[in-house]
Image (cartoon, rainbow, N blue to C red):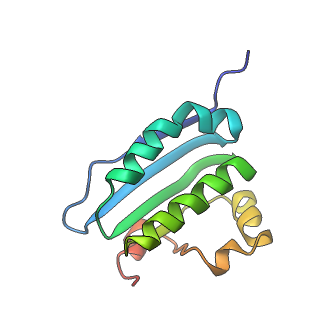
Amino acid sequence: MFEPQLHLVVEPYDTAHSAQVIRLQGEFDKLGLAAVKEELEVAMTRFTGKYLIFDLADLNFINSEGIGFLIGVYTHVSNIGGIFCLVGAKSHVQDVFEALGLWNVIKHPDSIEACYSLT
């Protein structure tokens, strides 16, 4: 049996910026999503701030399962008037988002701090 290779760290809520940062580490595929889906859904539904930021600096792989989940989060955050950002993606992860045209929709500044200037 395979061990899930996705871990997440939900950073303490940043009240100064009304922001929640979630760090994804490992491989965001079906097995990985299953391991952290409940925790991700709780973080997403509790989110009431302005910025929900996913830090992908330690994400090594993403497939359709991960992409689909992130699109759902993007939709939810947008519907409640928040700003969804992805930061720190490695080049091969960026290539996936670029190939799907998602960089035309999802904000992806160079840093967490850069998200705070987005509207």
Residue 96 coordinates in the image, percent (x, y): 76, 62
Question: Looking at this view, is 42 or 114 the one in front?
Answer: 42
Q: Is residue 37 above or below residue 117?
A: above
The residue drawn where x is 29% and y is 65% is: 49
Residue 9 coordinates in the image, percent (x, y): 42, 41
In the image, is 114 to the left or to the right of 109? left
In the image, is 6 to the left or to the right of 94? left
The residue drawn where x is 61% and y is 78% is: 105
Residue furthest out toward the front: 79
Question: Looking at this view, is 60 or 75 the one in front?
Answer: 75
Residue 13 coordinates in the image, percent (x, y): 26, 54
Which quadrant would residue 14 be assigned to in this image?
bottom left
Residue 106 coordinates in the image, percent (x, y): 58, 73
Q: Is residue 66 above or below residue 48?
A: above
Residue 80 in view, yes or no = yes
In the image, is 73 to the left or to the right of 9? right
